[in-house]
Structure formats: C-alpha cells, structure tokens
Amino acid sequence: MPTTAENQNTMEFLLDVPVKLTVELGNCEMTMKDLLQLGIGAVVQLDKPSSDPIDIFVNQKLVARGEIVVVEDNLGVKITEVSTGGAQDEVGETRPGPTEEAS
C-alpha cells in the first residue's frame, strides 16, 4: 500500500500534467454544398440559444458551464456551474471525440 509521502509525490506529479480545456459555443449540421458556399461575412447559426451557458470540457469531459466574457482584448469564460461529480450530475457527461459519432 502506498505511503502518505508516496501519495503526496504522485499528487504533485499529477498537478503538472497538461490537460486540454475546450469551450464549446454550440454545433450545427449543414450539407457539404452549404459548407462550400460559406465565405467572408457568412453567419453560421448554432444550435444553442444565446442565453444558454456554454460548455467547458477538460480532455473531452464536460466539467463546467459558463458565459463568454472579454478579458482585455481576448475572449474568456466566466464559470457559472461546476461538476460536483455526483451520479446525477449532468455536467459530468462526456463529449464524443473526433473519431466517435455524436448522438
């Protein structure tokens, strides 16, 4: 069984592991024909109302929700909901990866 010191060393190691944080505004489906007709100034309507919170993923797992903010000249996200890890917590869902088909 690992000692407390070994657990502490493992935790310190894990704190330096990089993770990918992704913010998803929404999705849409379109035909290839419509995609090829997109040009400068085209507007793509997403499937989410502007009042809904946006999804925040860490390594493709939904961990929080938030709202878009401006930080200096960059976009940012203000976190408004965080996953508690409970069995009924819908924020804990997993997003399909690039090779998985979205349902």
Image: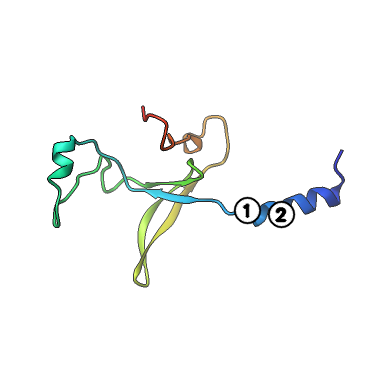
Q: Residue at x 71, y 54 (%)?
A: 13
Quarter of the figure with residue 29: top left
Furthest residue toward top: 103
Decide which of 51, 15 is in the foreground and name it: 15
- Label count reads 2
Indicate the position of residue 96 as horizontal and vertical percent values.
43, 34
Mark 2 — residue?
A: 13
Mark 1 — residue?
A: 17
Indicate the position of residue 66 as horizontal and vertical percent values.
41, 51
Indicate the position of residue 59 as horizontal and vertical percent values.
51, 44
SS label for mark 1: loop
Which amino acid lies under the numbered mark 2 shown in the image of this protein? Phe
Which amino acid lies under the numbered mark 1 shown in the image of this protein? Val
Decide which of 49, 37 is in the foreground and name it: 37
Q: Residue at x 37, y 54 (%)?
A: 67
Colouring of the image = rainbow
Q: Residue at x 58, y 54 (%)?
A: 18
On screen, residue 68 versus residue 84, left or right, reads: left
On screen, residue 24 versus residue 28, left or right, reads: right
